[in-house]
Amino acid sequence: MRFLANENFPLDAVEALRQKVHDVLWIRVESPGISDREVLSRAQAENRILLTFDQDFGELAFRSRLPASVGIILFRIRVPSGSVVAEKVAKVISLRDDWYGHFTVIEEDKIRMRDLTVRSLILYRVCSASTSLHRVGAIRIKG
């Protein structure tokens, strides 16, 4: 998969994904200091999934009406160290292959996915005893 890691994304996590043979560009190296809008535009232009810890991308993504060739994964997990984040990121990314076309929020015990083209929300629970996901439900969002 093709990823664009935001500046706030740890190097350990970028390297862990690269070791799993993912194509990962890192804003901190490629274009440090660019705005969130520019980061999102680059992800869109290069058909990459944006990896970030920055919550501002949620609102920006839906205002921008991103195409299905782009995705955003927002991590809302504890960050004790870069290596712990790298382990969690690599595990979560390997659970699915449909990150494109979704705004996804990764939390400690669940994954929320919202289709960027259809106004719906899908909720998954992460089974702590394994590397599987369990679909909890889906809701349609009006508006």
Image (tube, grey):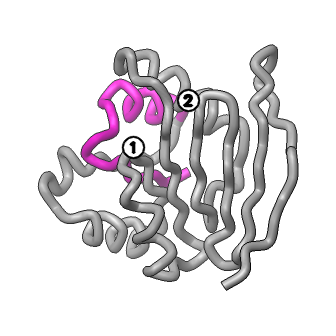
Q: Position of residue 116 (x, y in %)?
A: 62, 72
To which quarter of the image does residue 53 belong?
top left
Q: Can you identify the residue that label 1 sits on? A: 53
Q: Can you identify the residue that label 2 sits on? A: 90
The disc placed on residue 122 is none
**Residue neighbourhood size for the residue with mark 1, other residues' Cα within 10 Å, grouped as few (<14), some (14–19), many (≥20):** some
Instruction: Give the amino acid at mark 2.
Output: Ala
Query: Marks 1 and 2: CB-CB under 8 Å?
Result: no
User: In the figure, 29 relative to 78: above or below?
Assistant: below
Position of 126 compared to 62: left or right? right
Q: Residue at x 79, y 72 (%)?
A: 140
Q: Is residue 105 magenta?
A: no
Q: CA distance from mark 1 to mark 2?
A: 15 Å
Q: Position of residue 10 (x, y in %)?
A: 32, 31
Residue numbers of the magenta segment: 1-20
Looking at the image, which is closer to me, 66 or 125? Answer: 125
For numbered disc 1, what is the local secondary structure?
A: loop
Position of 129 compared to 85: left or right? right
Q: Is residue 16 magenta?
A: yes
**Sequence-wise first label, 1 or 2:** 1
Q: Position of residue 85 (x, y in %)?
A: 45, 24
Looking at the image, which residue sits at the far front? 142
Instruction: Give the amino acid at mark 1.
Output: Phe
For numbered disc 2, what is the local secondary structure?
A: helix
